[in-house]
Amino acid sequence: MKAMIVGADGQLGRALQEILGDDAIALGSAEIDITSPESISSQLDTFNPTIVFNAAAYNFVDQAEDEPEVAYRVNALGPRNLAIECQKRDKSLVHISSDYVFGLQSSLTPWTELDTPGPVSAYGMSKLSGEYFVRSLCSKHFVVRTCGLYGHAARRGTGKGNFVETMLRLGNEREELRIIDDQKCTPTNAHDLAVTLCDLAITTSYGLYHATNRGAATWARFAEEIFAYLRMPTKVVRITSTEYHTKARRPAMSLLNCYKLEAVLQNPLRTWESALHEYLDQRTD
């Protein structure tokens, strides 16, 4: 598998590079502009990969409310351009999406791939649009939704920040943190997701998938596990979403049902606690 990683400087892009090694062509924003069909076409013709991993995205959820056109250009039109160019060359495309495509409806159980999405933010709408473009324009596609992603690239200064790094920074600065406790999610280790994407990419089971570590948490529970594992004295005060105002709405239920993925790969991801502990251990090595 000759792979091209788009968005190679981010958390997931770095994790994909670590797994694929010399087999990967790693392109950051300085090398490829997914909003430009010409840039994509040039790189595909130069390197001629068999598969493209699109880990590039506009991830500023609140800022997207003020500049939805920017989010749409990167998260929707960018994947559209990639899908068109990959289809022309009969190449597979792995595109990463988000739990933020949900939120409008309520659910007591994790979302499946058959559930109707309903975003509640400009960011979520841009990600859902990107999904639809890829699914309709590239026949050899894997669209993979994930949730609560964190990876080591943020710690090395080569990727955007993540919740774990933010909690560790704030936990060292403050005795007490107020964290939301009414939004359910599954924290997902970027390395675990990258392994799964590579395993999925060598199949021909194209389609829409959910991929997260196993289990459920709230953001407050996530923070408590971080501090407890590292024996940090920081106290977590559990609050509601209405007590912590953000410009963009977040889904109250972000749990994703991953049974479809597990049926294809026969290898479920490990629990979010186990993945987090390993991440923290590696961080302190």
Image (spheres, rainbow, N blue to C red):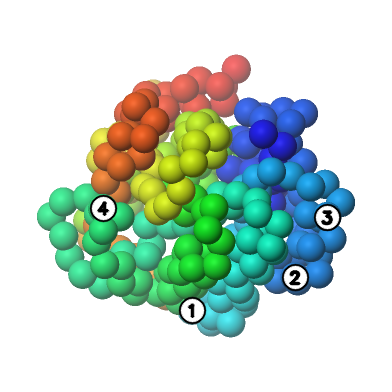
Q: Are marks 3 and 1 in contact (CB under 8 Å)?
A: no
Picture coordinates of residue 119, whole percent (x, y): 35, 71
Picture coordinates of residue 158, whole percent (x, y): 70, 44
Residue drawn where x is 42% and y is 52% of the image: 207
Mark 3 or mark 2, earlier in chain: 2
Which residue is disc 2 drawn over?
A: 37
CA–CA distance in space, label 1 to label 4: 27 Å
> Along the line of sight, which residue is nearer the eye, 47 or 77?
47
Mark 4 or mark 2, earlier in chain: 2
CA–CA distance in space, label 4 to label 3: 36 Å
Q: Are marks 2 and 1 in contact (CB under 8 Å)?
A: no
Neighbor class of circle 3 (other Cα within 10 Å; few <14, some 14-19, many 20+) is: few
Which residue is disc 1 drawn over?
A: 65
Q: Amino acid at mark 3?
A: Asp
CA–CA distance in space, label 4 to label 2: 32 Å
Mark 2 or mark 1, earlier in chain: 2
The answer to whether 158 is drawn above or below residue 68 in the figure is above
The picture quadrant where one finds residue 247 is: bottom left
Which residue is disc 4 drawn over?
A: 112
Residue drawn where x is 33% and y is 34% of the image: 262
CA–CA distance in space, label 3 to label 2: 12 Å
Neighbor class of circle 1 (other Cα within 10 Å; few <14, some 14-19, many 20+) is: some
Q: Amino acid at mark 4?
A: Thr
**Mark 1 element type:** helix
**Mark 2 element type:** helix
Mark 4 or mark 3, earlier in chain: 3
Q: Are marks 3 and 2 in contact (CB under 8 Å)?
A: no
Neighbor class of circle 4 (other Cα within 10 Å; few <14, some 14-19, many 20+) is: some
Q: Quick check: can you spot residue 127?
A: no
Which residue is disc 3 drawn over?
A: 45
The picture quadrant where one finds residue 154 is: top right
Give the number of marks: 4
